[in-house]
Image (cartoon, rainbow, N blue to C red):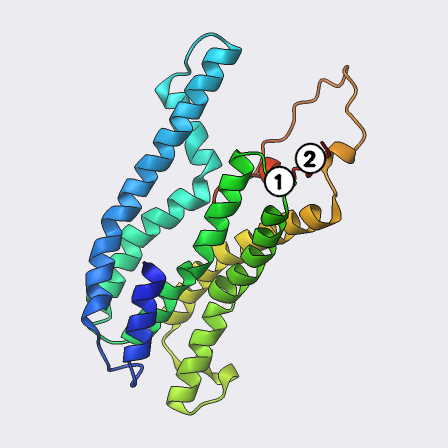
Amino acid sequence: MASSAGYIIASSCEEIIEDQHWLTTTYILFAVPYFIYDIYAMFMCYWYKVQVKGHEEEGRAKPMGEVIRSYLWREFLMVLHHVVMVTVCFPVSVFWRQGKGDYFQGVMFMAELSTPSVCLGKILIQYKQQHTLLHKVNGALMLVTFFVCRVLLFPYLYYAYGRYASIPFYMVPLSIPWQYNAGAALLMAPQVYWFCLICRGAFRLFTGASRHQRPPLSSTDSEPRSPLPPPVNGYGPQDMEREPSTH
């Protein structure tokens, strides 16, 4: 839906700074409740899994406070992303822009073109279909779409403005207010981080590398394991590193 709205907005703006489209603000107002609900929905899913696992392993449910802390650690980047979208990007997009730059807003909406492949990958992992051709094809598609729609997105925005202002691409960061550069850097940083994790998972998927091939730890090794880093769009390291089934 976001990609469709973004395409309609971007294709309707011939003048990329001044042209406006009613769908821009309308969709932003529609998306804000989604981000709030999504934080709640992700927590409820995590809480349910923890409760079930706790009953199976310990015979008792974990306290809510412990579950919340664990959830915030595991999904820190995703929760931070949603919170920033609501508390920073929403007022910037609706009020601070003063109706300018709808074209750029529409292009940024089209970043969601990468989301279906990310979601399908997680579904296939949930159903233990990592060994299937569909999972490998989807993994390749996710790698390409995420790179194009979320990483190359920001250089393209600078390129588009350079064409509009008739200045070289490398001069664009020096020709715009520092707030734009800071905002682009903050938005791009987690995308690059997530893309690096996706590349690592894709490498292990297509080469067959796995943590299972590492020498097992000694049973007398009492050193605690280091905590796992937060997952990327639902892909934890344990999911991205799983080896295709040999059954």
Which residue is under mark 1? 130
Residue 77 vs 169, above or below: the answer is: above
Residue 243 vs 151, above or below: the answer is: above
- The crowd level at tag 1 (other Cα within 10 Å; few <14, some 14-19, many 20+) is many
Instruction: Kindly indicate whether the residue at mark 1 contacts the one at mark 2 (C-beta within 8 angstroms).
Output: yes
Which residue is under mark 2? 245
| CA separation in Å, label 2 and label 1 | 7 Å
- The crowd level at tag 2 (other Cα within 10 Å; few <14, some 14-19, many 20+) is few
- The disc labelled 1 sits on which kind of residue? Gln
User: Residue at 42% of width from left, 62% of height from top?
Assistant: 111
Q: Is residue 230 visible?
A: no
Of 220 and 104, nearer the camera is 104
- The disc labelled 2 sits on which kind of residue? Ser
Pick the quarter of the image with the C terminus: top right
Q: Which image quadrant for residue 7?
A: bottom left
Q: Is residue 59 left or right of residue 64?
A: right
Q: Is residue 113 visible?
A: yes
Q: Residue furthest top?
A: 59
Secondary-structure class at tag 1: loop
Pick the quarter of the image with the N terminus: bottom left
Q: Position of residue 97 (x, y in %)?
A: 24, 70
Q: Residue furthest bottom?
A: 166
User: Residue at 52% of width from left, 34% of height from top?
Assistant: 126
Of 214 and 224, nearer the camera is 214
